[in-house]
């Protein structure tokens, strides 16, 4: 089922951009955890459109309602259903584009696959689908925080050619990230990024960027070799986010330029066990967490829908000049930050339950 993710902790998202609403059903969350909408809303607020002039002008308050799986403020262990209404749809913006597949969007491929597609707003391919992921991710994050002290923080580390300074992954906080309108903890880079995104928006164009993420306090032992290696599931989770084009863990592609002698992470005594001196592995070895922070990066392309004139063809192959209408993100990375955090939580929550299930049996 293509809209369901996870093994013991499963999330299914539902809804299109311009239907009545979107959301998720999270199945497998253990019983007995205090949970209310207030645990979920802050992450939805960080994802919602219209947060600043640097994002789309679509206005949605994205208020979540929990409609099952929680009674008297406590999880029952049954599926948790969450719903967010769509309010600010403007299907007319898409009328002119019904016969024209937007270059590098999903109109052409959805039409080829299903022979039909949502008539406006991108349907399931719209970033509104990610609301369900963020809602479910917030629940799982709470579970991981209470049970293990897990902390997940993502931030914008690049926009187009502008690279932010390296971040101290042991100490970066969401408050520091949110102090920047770009969600980039480097103030000088923030200024340049914001100026670029404003200019690009005025020019009716778009730019890409990179979201980095750290997951701290992950115990050693999470991850299921060989096909469900932790980095493999994280890669799948991240590359399922719309507009993603790349995934790196630890040293990533840059690691190829180092020798083994420089790249290896020597062990050291730490606490009751071992730690590593460096973390080029990004916290995962052999597909299993090693107790160090998990560090990953996700590349996002420039969003496809732009107001600038593009020469293309319609579904009949006739040449057309497309000047896309609608309210679109000139750069998705500030809003992608909570989505990356949510997908990391969903993978880690599932791996935590899978490891717990194995450890439960005593001989
Ligand atoms: C937070 C977020 C916001 C997005 N906003 C837009 C947008 O305003 N316009 C657009 O064309 N694409 C936007 N996208 C990307 C599209 O949903 C995506 O490019 C499209 O579905 C095609 O899928 P693909 O790029 O993964 O191949 C956004 C993605 C994210 C994560």
Image: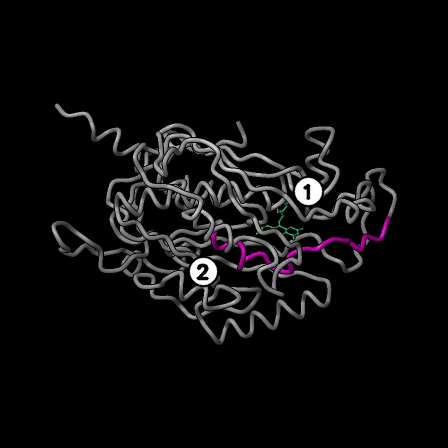
Q: Is residue 35 visible?
A: yes
For this view, does 129 lie left or right of residue 218?
right
Residue 79 position (above or below residue 185): above
Taking the spot 27% from the left edge, 53% from the top edge, the residue there is: 292
Q: Is residue 5 visible?
A: no
Taking the spot 48% from the left edge, 55% from the top edge, the residue there is: 337
Taking the spot 70% from the left edge, 62% from the top edge, the residue there is: 205
Residue 72 position (above or below residue 87): above
Q: Which residues are magenta?
A: 320-338
Residue beneath disc 2:
155
Query: What kind of element bears circle 1?
Result: loop
Camera-side residue of 342 and 34: 34
Taking the spot 65% from the left edge, 60% from the top edge, the residue there is: 330
Q: Are circles 1 and 2 on residues that touch, CB within 8 Å? A: no
Ligand 1 within 8 Å, label 1 CB: yes
Q: Position of residue 179 (x, y in %)?
A: 45, 68
Residue beneath disc 1:
122
């Amino acid at each position: 089922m293509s809209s369901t993710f996870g093994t013991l902790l499963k999330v299914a998202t539902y809804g299109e951009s311009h239907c009545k609403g979107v959301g998720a059903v999270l199945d497998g969350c253990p019983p007995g955890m205090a949970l209310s909408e207030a645990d979920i809303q802050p992450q939805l607020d960080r994802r919602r459109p219209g947060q600043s002039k640097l994002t789309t002008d679509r206005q949605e308050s994205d208020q979540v309602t929990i409609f099952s799986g929680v009674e008297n403020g406590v999880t029952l262990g049954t599926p948790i259903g969450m719903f967010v209404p769509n309010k600010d749809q403007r299907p007319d913006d898409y009328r002119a584009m019904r016969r024209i597949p937007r270059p590098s969007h999903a109109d052409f491929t959805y039409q080829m696959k299903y022979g039909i597609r949502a008539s406006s707003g991108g349907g399931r391919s719209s970033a509104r689908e990610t609301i369900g992921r963020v809602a479910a991710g917030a629940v799982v994050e709470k579970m991981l925080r209470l049970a293990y002290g897990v902390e997940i923080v993502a931030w914008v580390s690049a926009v187009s050619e502008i690279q932010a300074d390296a971040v101290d992954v042991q100490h970066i906080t969401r408050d520091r990230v949110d102090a920047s309108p770009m969600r980039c903890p480097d103030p000088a880079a923030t200024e340049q990024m914001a100026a670029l995104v404003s200019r690009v928006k005025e020019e009716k164009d778009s730019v890409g960027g990179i979201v980095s993420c750290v997951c701290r306090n992950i115990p050693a032992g999470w991850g299921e070799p060989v096909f469900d290696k932790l980095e493999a599931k994280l890669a799948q989770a991240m590359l399922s986010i719309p507009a993603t084009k790349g995934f790196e863990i630890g040293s990533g592609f840059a690691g190829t330029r180092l020798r083994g002698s420089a790249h290896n992470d020597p062990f050291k005594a730490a606490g009751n066990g071992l730690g590593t001196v460096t973390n080029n592995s990004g916290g995962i070895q052999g597909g299993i967490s090693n107790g160090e922070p998990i560090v990953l990066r996700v590349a996002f392309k420039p969003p496809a829908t732009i107001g600038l004139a593009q020469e293309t063809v319609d579904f009949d192959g006739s040449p057309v000049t497309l000047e896309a209408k609608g309210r679109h993100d000139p750069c998705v990375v500030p809003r992608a930050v909570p989505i990356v955090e949510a997908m990391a939580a969903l993978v880690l929550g599932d791996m935590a339950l899978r490891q717990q299930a194995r450890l439960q049996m005593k001989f």
